[in-house]
Image: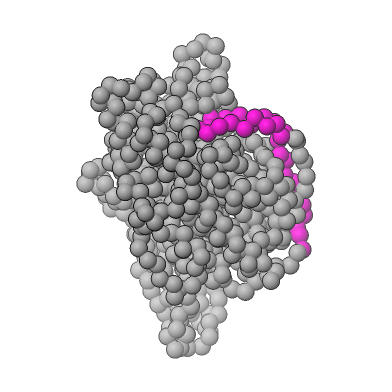
Amino acid sequence: MNLFNTNTRPSVIIYLLGILLVGCQTGPKNSEKEIAISTEIQLPERPNILWLVTEDMGSYIPSFGDSTIVTPNLSRLAAEGVVYPNLYSTSGVCAPSRAALIMGMYPSSIGANHMRTTSYTEVTGLPSYGAVPPQQARMFSELLRMTGYYCSNNNKEDYQFEAPKTGWDESSAYAHWRNRNENQPFFSVFNFTDTHESGLFEPYGFRKAETRHYHEGDRRYKWGADRLTEEETPVHLSKDTDFDIPPYLPDTPKVRRDMWKLYNNIAEMDKQVGAVLKQLEDDGLLENTIIFFYGDHGGPLPREKRLIYDSGLNTPLIVRFPNKQLAGTKDTQLLSFVDFAPTLLSLVGTEPPSYMQGQAFLGKYKAEKERKYIHAAADRFDGFTDAIRAVRDDRFKYIRNYRPEQGYYLPVVYREGIPTMQELLRMRDEGTLDSIQALWFREQKDPEELYDCTTDPYELNNLAQNPDYSGKMEELRTEMDRWLQQIGDVPNLPEKELISKLWNGAETKPITSEPIITSANNKITIDCATQGASIGYKIVDKDSAATEVWSVYLNPFEIPEGSKVIAQAYRIGYVPGETVESITE
């Protein structure tokens, strides 16, 4: 059944650049030349938007040049959509990158740049804290809800702050577009976890996650064990496959086994993607929905995840438009995670707010000029701190190390659960790593790094001291300085001082004021003294039955006689206010 009419708003113009794909990638390169395309796409007035998000995902799939594993569902999606090979996360790890996605702001501009700010407090000696965006900032899912969209998230958040009740209609293991009101447009997110770095740990076995996506919305469904035994693990390719081992990893049996696990996990994730796409088709919604598939940053292997080389930042993006418009094409423009929030608002016809630091690459408010640079940062990871910033154009990457006296490798305990990491450490201690593999373990870093990502895709040959590249060095230094000043980033700022800045000098986390509910003639008004607070509310009828979803308060509203309202105010990064209630007159 088609739940939406086919009326279209004015055409959205998409320009696909007809240039050769170049860039830093860990997988094989696609040298096919694309034909320049300028065409119109027609969208519903209120399109649905579906995000299919996997974790720790480099360019390891056929549609991005690596045919090691078969991914029928992702390959179909790419054949029916547009491939974007030059998408970059703002960090090489998930939580800061997810903060950028949901806010449209760089993590280091809102205090979201340190990984795991609510844990490792005994190690760091710091209080638990979260990012604090400016008072006008909202999760863009809340902004979509304010325009009438049903927003669901299944089910990972991990934004470096606690999401307010107003952020989603539902965020749970059961969240699904099927739980919305009839004819309501939706923005739905499904997160797939099998490709996460923990999927490389031993004993190897999948989380039993694939069933989740066959039973979304059915709250009667109960899940079984979290993990399968190795004997039950599906095998999607031979363990004897001739894997292409990147030069920064040794070619040993343990590394090859991890490569096999990596590709096997991708194949399992592809099955889950197919399950969700089938549900969309079964519901008659495929041609009213814009589908995004992407990873939350680059690959899961050592010297990929957490680093701001492209192996840690570059992740595949596929966008399928209704009725397969622009099917099988490629758009090579540079894209950043901060561009997603303004782009989704633009696609539904809402102008992105000025506080967002990204730019729309699709829709009514698409930027006039394509992005020239992407930016990234690396700071604390669990209990270990560094301070690195990067800027990249379509060919060159410039990295500035604010702690050059400190080596690149950080002994993150979680990462050391990967057998390949254990292998690297064993060979390091034995002195058997080659010169490339040993680079990561050098005792000091160069203050500056410059890489030609076309000729040196693994970023191994530092050109910073080469006089032939002095002009490029100056250009990218200037761009980095401009960016840091624009977003208010102070690299290497002690985290204690960052917390003080976020909390306006207070010793403890700020508290959101309780909402104030007033009623007259069954009309409800809700206020909050905390500037920038979002207010969520539910209506409880005379039989004490409450609405299931927390609504976003926008304007005074009427409720049935005898009902009451419960409300809570929330400012991102603050302690939530107490829930209050009021009985109508």
Image-quadrant location for residue 56: top left
Judge whether residue 26 is colored magenta. Answer: yes
- Residue 344 visible in the shown view: no
Where does the image place residue 144, in percent across and percent down from the top left? 58, 60
Q: In the shown orientation, is residue 447 left or right of residue 340? A: left
| Colour scheme shown | one colour
Q: Residue at x 57, y 39 (%)?
A: 67
> Image point 47% across, 70% down: which residue?
550
Q: Is residue 569 above or below residue 382?
A: below
Q: Compared with residue 343, is residue 425 higher up or lower down, i.e. above or below?
A: above
Q: Nearer the viewer, residue 449 or 551?
A: 449
Q: Position of residue 167 (x, y in %)?
A: 48, 61
Q: Is residue 451 magenta?
A: no
As drawn, 176 above or below 327: below
Q: Which residue is at the front of the view, 230 or 390?
A: 230
Residue occupying image coordinates x 29% and y 50%: 119
For the stretch drawn in magenta, what is the main secondary structure?
A: loop
- Choose between 33 and 357: the one closer to the eye: 33
Task: Report the span colored magenta.
Answer: 7-34
Q: Is residue 549 visible?
A: yes
Q: Where does residue 24 sit, x and y in percent of width and height?
A: 53, 30
